[in-house]
Image: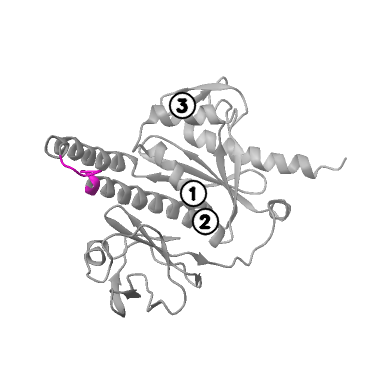
Amino acid sequence: MNKAAMAVKTAASAESFPEKIDANITFFKGMYRDLTDTSVVLKLWNGKKWIWVPCGLTGRPFPKEAAILSPTLVHEEKWLMFHVPVKQENSDARTAKERMQEGARVCSVRFTNTDSFAVCTVLDEGSGQLAVKNCRGGNAYRHHCRALLKKVEASRAFTDKDNVSQPNRKYYMHLKHLNEHYAHQVSKEIIDFCKEKHTGILVLPEYDEDFSRISMYRSGNYSPLHLSIRIRNYLKYKAWAEGILVLELRADRTEKQCSICGATGKKQGSIFICQNGHQVNRFLNGARNLGRKCQESFRKNNKPS
């Protein structure tokens, strides 16, 4: 876990800090104290003696009941980042096969490039749909990103000739924090949905490298689909902390088959229409098929030979 932006400008401008840090600094026991979600006191050398320096912290809170390991101070251009690793135990050690045999519910996810960051569906042991979740906010995220990028473009006329490595850094830091905010928000919504519906397995789509590269290129940077990379990473550690197992499954053909009758079909905008006339949201259709594909793979493996 990274505890980002330690003390930001306050710590960076303190006289106790050296003018330049060329290497990461790890703080072992006795070199820091009073570490909380919002502050820490560090033992630093001011050139004459060791002193204790209070520093403010920003970033996501530490997980409850997690063991705090030795933090590291990382210098990134004009910023000081305080990275704090944590160790958290998980009491549920059941494998995916064991969970499936015990009738675990499955939550499958389909990421999109629309106002819905993700569409989720929970399936019971018999592949029946129990609940659906739309994680919205994609349009707002896209709007905020575009507004910041416009500020970057507008400022270039005044900063391109400045003798600095990244004159628009403050705007890019805003973009970074915006990405983190939405990725945490969406991943939390999905995990909360899984917990509410007592889901034991979370299934995420996996695509081949060429398809992923083309999709990300077409969606563009700072798009809801592009943010799914970060959302996916956050989901993995958050699910593990809650005892939910994450599986990644190839999504081949999950978007071309009707989740109601199994017939083939095609998409028309946000709707999937099959040859038998069934109509369903195409993202929900893909999520259903992905979850059932996962369940079916375990059923085949459990059949007696």
Q: Write down the quadrant of residue 59 in the picture.
A: bottom left
Whether residue 202 is situated above or below residue 153 in the rendered picture:
below
Q: Secondary structure at mark 3?
A: helix
Whether residue 256 is situated above or below residue 287 in the rendered picture:
above
Q: Which residue is mark 3?
A: 214
| Mark 3 and mark 1 residues within 8 Å of each other at the beta carbon | no
Tell me residue 218's x, y (percent).
40, 27
The stretch drawn in magenta includes residue 41: no
- 268 and 74: which is toward the camera: 74
The stretch drawn in magenta includes residue 164: yes
Q: Write down the quadrant of residue 164 in the picture.
A: top left
Q: How many marks?
A: 3
Tell me residue 285's x, y (percent).
53, 34
- 232 and 52: which is toward the camera: 52
Residue depicted at 50% across the width and 73% down the height: 65
Whether residue 169 is situated above or below residue 18 in the rendered picture:
above
**Label 3, label 2: how far apart the Cα atoms are:** 27 Å
Query: Disc 2 marks which amino acid?
Result: Tyr
- Residue lying at the far left in this picture: please name it: 158
Q: Which residue is mark 2?
A: 237
Query: Disc 1 marks which amino acid?
Result: Asn
Disc 2: CA contacts within 10 A as few (<14), some (14-19) or many (>=20): some
Q: Secondary structure at mark 2?
A: helix
- Residue lying at the far top in this picture: please name it: 275
